Image (tube, grey):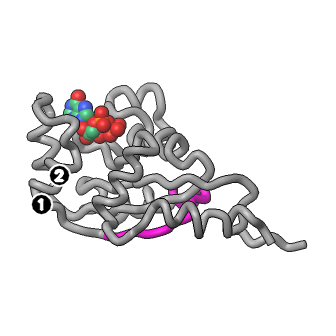
Amino acid sequence: MIMSPLRWTRSLQLTLAIIKPDAVAHPIISDAVHQRILDNKFLIVRSRELQWRAKDCQHFYEEHAGRFFYQRLVEFMSSGPVRAYILAHEDAIQLWRKIMGPTKVYRSRITAPDTIRGHLGLTDTRNTTHGSDSVESACREISIFFPDFDVSRWYEEQEPLYRAGP
Ligand code: IDP
């Protein structure tokens, strides 16, 4: 029996991934990140490119408000287009964070040079990618970038189709 590559035998999870402005500005870098998504067999459920306003960034990163890097982060994330993805995979949240590598680039270069940030990150702020860190944050972040996407409905209606197999 031939299995479709989009058929899965385990449950899928959704996560939100972002390619940050430092990478979108250079297609060779954003293409390399996109290739990591494909190589790791994520299902791309949605994707879009957009230019954030400072107030969008402030809202998205509100948990960091007041920290020393917050203003720099807001300015950077609104400095050029970002590309956002809803990705599906088994344990998508942990898998994408593992592929991204540690937040701080100097650390990822030493301890995880094969990760996206270890390989392509420029600084602790310009660290190439974002990934949700929990199921709750994935739901919140997906709704910010894709307001017409219903996460609960996807889990009810779409995920079983991939899990069911032929
Ligand atoms: P994460 O992106 O690995 O989940 P968070 O702690 O949620 O890390 O921080 C959000 C973003 O804030 C980071 O991706 C990075 O761009 C920026 N950031 C975090 N810590 C620092 C820092 O110590 N210096 C500069 N920027 C930072």
Q: Pointer 1 and pointer 2: residues touching (CB < 8 Å)?
A: yes
* Residue 102, percent from left and from top: 40, 33
* Residue 142, percent from left and from top: 37, 58
**Above-or-below relation of 99 to 34:** above
**Above-or-below relation of 141 to 154:** above
* Residue 57, percent from left and from top: 17, 51
Residue at 34% x, 56% y is 19
- Quick check: can you spot residue 67? yes
* Residue 37 - label: none
Q: Distance of mark 1 from mark 2, alpha carbons?
A: 7 Å
> Which quadrant holds residue 145?
bottom left
Quadrant including the N terminus: bottom right
Residue at 50% x, 55% y is 14
Quadrant including the C terminus: bottom right
* Ligand 1 occupies quarter: top left
Q: Nearer the viewer, residue 120 or 21?
A: 21
- Quick check: can you spot residue 124? no
Relative side of 130 to 101, left or right = left
Residue at 58% x, 63% y is 156
* Residue 53 - label: 1
Residue at 19% x, 35% y is 64
* Residue 114, percent from left and from top: 50, 39
Relative side of 122 to 90, left or right = left
Magenta span of residues? 36-48
Q: Amino acid at mark 1?
A: Arg
Dot 2 crowding, Cα within 10 Å, few <14, some 14–19, many 20+: some
